[in-house]
């Protein structure tokens, strides 16, 4: 239930960002990135790549929850969910880019956004999968320490025991 609620809230927020009438980091946008760009300048990053790095990074961060929610939705997160999260994010992102170019004259179509969004979703899914795998050994060790508890859980999960 909580996961579904978080997913709905994220989807609404994502919709606002993807379909804001102008670039979200430009004039009239939702955020300002001047501070990040200035920080990169202090680290010596050349001017012509500062903005693309910030924009791609923010696009990836925007889709981290997408991948995390996708992987968390499944009872047993597996590594294939990383690839499927990236592909699903690519489809959603490409659809949004096409809609932006067709219906929002203040927005531009950019395949780099699709790539960054896909990478962000894959990283989000990977975090959930790795987190689930690190929890499983601890659970197995606890169950091994209390064999009666593991047997009662297995008994409760049998279809004919319900």
Image (cartoon, rainbow, N blue to C red):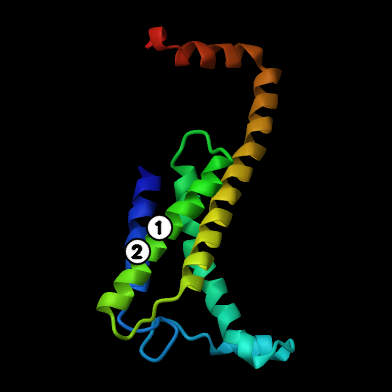
Q: Residue 18 appears in which quarter of the rendering?
A: bottom left
The count of marks equals: 2
Locate residue 16: give its quadrant.
bottom left
- In the picture of the structure, the residue carrying the numbered disc 2 is 95
Find disc 1 in the rendering and name its residue. Answer: 91
Label placed on residue 1: none
Q: Which quadrant of the rendered structure holds the N terminus?
A: top left
Please tell me which residue lies in front, 153 or 34: 34
137 vs 151: above or below? below
Q: Is residue 102 left or right of residue 74?
A: left
Which residue is at a point 39% across and 92% down the rendered structure image?
A: 27
Left or right: where 79 falls relative to 9 = right
Task: Check the image and name the residue furthest to the right.
Answer: 44
Residue 50 shows in the view: yes
**Dot 2: element:** helix
Dot 1: what SS? helix
In-image side of 145 versus 112 (left or right): right
CA neighbours of label 1 inside 10 A, class few (<14), some (14 to 19), many (20+): some
- Give the x, y percent position of residue 44: 74, 89
Which quarter of the figure is the C terminus placed in?
Answer: top left
Residue appearing at x 58%, y 88% in the figure: 35
Residue 153 in the image, given as x and y percentages of width and height: 52, 17
How far across and how far down the image is residue 145, in percent?
A: 70, 19
In this view, the residue farthest toward the top is 160
Please tell me which residue is depicted at 60% across the width and 79% down the height of the picture. 53
Instruction: In this rendered view, identify the residue nearer to me: 128 or 118.
Output: 118
| Residue 13 appearing in the image | no
Look at 56% across and 38% down and name the residue there. 78
Give yes or no for contact between labels 2 and 1 (Cβ–Cβ under 8 Å): yes
């Amino acid at each position: 239930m909580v996961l579904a609620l978080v997913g709905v809230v994220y989807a609404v927020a994502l919709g606002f960002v993807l379909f804001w009438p102008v670039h979200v980091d430009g004039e009239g946008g939702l955020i300002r990135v001047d501070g990040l760009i200035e920080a990169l300048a202090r680290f010596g990053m050349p001017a012509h790549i500062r903005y693309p790095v910030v924009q791609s990074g923010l696009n990836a961060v925007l889709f981290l929850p997408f991948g995390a929610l996708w992987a968390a939705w499944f009872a047993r997160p597996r590594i294939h969910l990383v690839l499927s999260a990236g592909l699903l994010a690519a489809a959603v992102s490409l659809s949004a880019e096409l809609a932006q170019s067709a219906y929002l004259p203040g927005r531009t179509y950019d395949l780099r956004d699709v790539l960054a969004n896909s990478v962000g979703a894959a990283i989000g899914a990977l975090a959930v999968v790795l987190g689930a795998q690190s929890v499983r050994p601890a659970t197995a060790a606890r169950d091994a320490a209390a064999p009666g508890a593991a047997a009662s859980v297995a008994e409760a999960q049998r279809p004919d025991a319900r």
